[in-house]
Image (spheres, grey):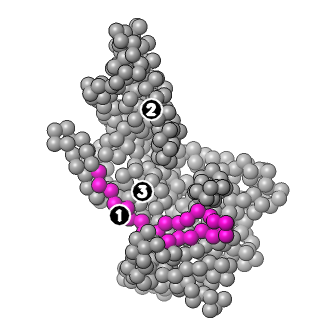
């Protein structure tokens, strides 16, 4: 095992630690962390992990968490880590005590994996995953699962606030349910809700969604899809797309082109027949460069709720304008009652519904994951750079195009109708902004003076 361990680089210390902590205890903590990581690397190698060109970079207490970085120049396409699934803690009901499996089957994946972590933690050194569990954080302090009422209020964005409250309520409800029906699933957290919530926050921030290959060998999110905690791989930090420039229409000010740059440099494969997930460089890395993997093209509130942070300049952020299409149409009827009256109103509503259905079908037929996701999303959103949900824009434009004279529900939408629809969407944005307790200037000022 000692010889094999040399195939995976040992952890080293980043030289960015502020000279603030001089206490011996800080050095002792750092030394203990390095020892735990070294033990983990050896354990992973013994169980079949292979890798070259990366090391675990351990930050100081004031510099953030761990990460992986290159120990030499790495060429694009080179495999830097191969992780057998057997290394990980997998969302599999067989991992739970038999008496708890019936209850766990109905639990959310975050609860199921949190319980696996708690069970392995209770086993201590007797756990087959002991070297891995020893390196997991006890708590993700920034996870909204820990937010109090004041902190939730400071989020200000109603959809995110609602989702945080729902997540907290579900977490507490499942703790109570497991205490009653499957206490053995909780490890040592039967009397300790905080420990249970800590575990849920940890697995939310570190879990991989693993997709197997379907019969054709193509990646599939529906064939063999499950969640897993993967040692070493879960130390890869996020490197997503960022906005690096934009062009605007000189007259309207609307964004006409958005320049986006990807910051990730590592990608991972689906689970192959050999039960191994491979991580390879997507471009050349230089010695000392941090290895980054994209956690997905997600909104800022998704990153906040599940990972406890929000990325900067995220081109995939969005804002929910309406909870669903019906909500959007009710709002429109209040904003423009004159368009909903009499026979003309019925024709306009029919035109809007037909436009919504037509665009939804077009998105479904597009075949791309993004289009299918948009078609399946009931909420109506505005995206970065002022892009609007095509279903909403088309429906609103049709409300101005449908007339008693033509009775057309499938005719072409002209420029004026689109302008009217865009004006309605702008009005909805202004309405939502007006409901915020602080202004944009207030928020920018708060961020500039924030020390946390």
Q: Which of marks 3 and 1 is nearer the N terminus?
A: 3
Q: Which residue is drawn at 27% across and 48% down?
A: 257
Q: Residue 310 carries which label?
A: 3
According to the image, label 2 marks what residue? 359
Is 321 situated left or right of 209 in this image? Answer: left
The magenta segment: 258-280
Q: Cα distance, mark 2 to mark 3?
A: 31 Å
Asked which secondary structure carries label 1, the reply is: loop
Q: Residue at x 38, y 65 (%)?
A: 263
Q: Cα distance, mark 1 to mark 2?
A: 46 Å
Q: Cα distance, mark 3 to mark 1?
A: 16 Å
According to the image, label 1 marks what residue? 451
Q: Which residue lies furthest to the right in this view?
A: 99
- Local crowd size for mark 1, using a 10 Å CA cut-off: few (<14), some (14–19), many (≥20): few
- Local crowd size for mark 2, using a 10 Å CA cut-off: few (<14), some (14–19), many (≥20): some
Q: Does the magenta stretch include residue 279?
A: yes
Q: Which of marks 1 and 2 is nearer the N terminus?
A: 2
């Amino acid at each position: 095992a000692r010889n094999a361990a040399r195939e995976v680089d040992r952890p080293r210390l980043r030289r960015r630690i502020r000279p603030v902590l001089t206490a011996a205890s800080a050095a002792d903590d750092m030394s203990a962390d390095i020892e735990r990581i070294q033990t983990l690397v050896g354990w992973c190698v013994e169980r079949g992990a292979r890798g070259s060109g990366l090391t675990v970079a351990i930050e100081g207490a004031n510099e953030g968490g761990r990460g992986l970085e290159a120990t030499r120049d790495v060429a694009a396409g080179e495999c830097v880590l191969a992780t057998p699934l057997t290394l990980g803690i997998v969302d599999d009901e067989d991992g739970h005590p038999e008496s708890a499996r019936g209850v766990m089957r109905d639990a959310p994946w975050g609860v199921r994996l949190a319980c696996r972590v708690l069970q392995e933690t209770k086993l201590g050194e007797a756990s087959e995953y002991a070297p891995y569990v020893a390196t997991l954080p006890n708590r993700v302090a920034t996870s909204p699962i820990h937010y109090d009422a004041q902190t939730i209020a400071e989020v200000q964005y109603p959809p995110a606030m609602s989702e945080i409250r729902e997540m907290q309520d579900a977490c507490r409800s499942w703790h109570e349910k497991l205490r009653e029906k499957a206490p053995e699933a909780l490890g040592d957290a039967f009397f300790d809700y905080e420990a249970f919530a800590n575990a849920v926050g940890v697995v939310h921030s570190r879990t991989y969604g693993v997709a197997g290959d379907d019969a054709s060998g193509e990646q599939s999110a529906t064939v063999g899809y499950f969640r897993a905690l993967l040692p070493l791989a879960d130390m890869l930090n996020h490197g997503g797309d960022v906005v690096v420039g934009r062009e605007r229409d000189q007259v309207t000010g609307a964004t006409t082109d958005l320049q986006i740059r990807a910051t990730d440099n590592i990608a991972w494969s689906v689970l192959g027949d050999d039960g191994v997930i491979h991580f390879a460089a997507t471009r050349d890395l230089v010695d000392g460069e941090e290895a980054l993997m994209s956690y997905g093209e997600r909104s800022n509130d998704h990153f906040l709720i599940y990972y406890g942070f929000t990325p900067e300049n995220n081109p995939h952020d969005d804002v929910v304008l309406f909870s669903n299409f019906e909500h959007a149409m009710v709002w429109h009827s209040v904003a423009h009652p004159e368009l909903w009256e009499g026979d003309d109103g019925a024709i306009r509503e029919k035109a809007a519904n037909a436009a919504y259905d037509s665009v939804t079908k077009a998105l479904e037929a597009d075949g791309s994951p993004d289009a299918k996701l948009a078609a399946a999303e009931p909420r109506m959103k505005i995206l970065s750079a002022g892009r609007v949900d095509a279903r909403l824009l088309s429906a609103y434009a049709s409300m101005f195009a449908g007339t008693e004279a033509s009775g057309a529900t499938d005719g072409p939408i002209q420029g004026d109708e689109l302008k009217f629809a865009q004006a309605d969407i702008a009005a909805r944005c202004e309405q939502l902004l007006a409901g915020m307790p602080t202004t944009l200037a207030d928020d920018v000022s708060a961020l500039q003076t924030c020390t946390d």
